[in-house]
Image (tube, grey):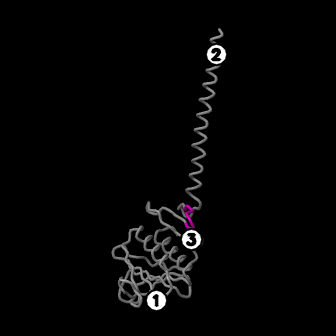
Amino acid sequence: SSGNKISKKSLYVTIFIVVLMVSSVIGFVAFSGQGENKIKADYEYNGFEFTKINNGWITKINSRDIYFDYLPEEVKDISYDNSKLSTQSKVYIAYDPSKENIDFVLSKLDNNIRLLGYNTNLACVKSENCPDIPVINCQDKDNIIFLKIDSKNSIYRDNGCIVIEGVDVIGLAKASDRFIYSISGVI
C-alpha cells in the first residue's frame, strides 16, 4: 500500500505540473496576443490600423506598408478638391528646383504613390537648377503633381496639375500625406 501512496502522490505532482505548464502556455499566448494587438494598432482610423514607427506611422494599404509623418486626424482639415490621378499614364511629380529643399517630401510622396501602383517620374517646373529630369508645366501636360511652397496648406487643380501646396516644408509634408490618404481611400 505504501507504493500506492507514492504513485498517487507522483500522479498529483504530474497533474499539477501539467496544469501549470498548460496554463502558462495559455497565459503566454493570451498575453503575447494582447501585446501584438497593442503593437499592431497604436491608432485606428476608418478601419485602417496605424503602427508608430520612428517619428511617423505605417499602415497597410492594398497589403503594402505605406509610411506617413502625420495621422489622418492631423491632416484631414486640409482642403482638397478631390482631383484624381490617372493610373493609365505616367504621373509626374514636379517641383521648383530654385526654391527650398523639399527632397524628403518629394521622395516620400514618390515612394508612396509608386507603392499604390502608379508609374512615377520626377520633373521640374523650371529648367534653372534642374537636375537631369524632364521640365514640364501645368499647361502642356496632364497627370502632374506639383509640390509647391506658397501661402497655404491645400490641394487643388491648376490645369493639368494637382497642386499640393504647403506654407513651408512641414505644411507640404502634411498636405502630401493628406493627398495619399485621400487617393488611397483612408480619408
> What's the magenta region?
50-56
Instruction: Name the amino acid type tagged 3.
Output: Tyr
Is residue 51 located in the magenta-colored stretch of the structure?
Answer: yes
* Residue at numbered disc 3: 70
* Discs 1, 2 touching: Cβ within 8 Å: no
Instruction: Name the amino acid type tagged 1.
Output: Ser
Disc 2 crowd rating (10 Å Cα; few below 14, some 14-19, many 20+) is few
Q: Nearer the viewer, residue 62 or 122?
A: 122
Would you identify the image quadrant in which residue 118 lies?
bottom left
Disc 3 crowd rating (10 Å Cα; few below 14, some 14-19, many 20+) is some
SS label for mark 3? loop
Q: Nearer the viewer, residue 71 or 125?
A: 125
Residue 174 location, x and y as percent?
Answer: 55, 76
Is residue 42 located in the magenta-colored stretch of the structure?
Answer: no
Q: Which mark is residue 6?
A: 2
Query: In this image, 67 relative to 19: left or right?
Result: left
* Residue at numbered disc 1: 98
SS label for mark 1? loop
Q: Earlier in the sequence, mark 1 or mark 2?
A: 2
In the rendered image, the residue lying farthest to the left is 89
* Discs 2, 3 touching: Cβ within 8 Å: no
Residue 146 location, x and y as percent?
Answer: 44, 83
SS label for mark 2? helix
Q: CA distance from mark 2 to mark 3?
A: 66 Å
Instruction: Name the amino acid type tagged 2.
Output: Ile
Q: CA distance from mark 3 to mark 1?
A: 27 Å
Q: Is 166 located above or below residue 42 in the figure?
A: below
Query: In this image, 133 relative to 31: left or right?
Result: left
Residue at 43% in and 62% down: 62
Residue 173 location, x and y as percent?
Answer: 53, 76
- Label 3 vs label 1, nearer the camera: 1
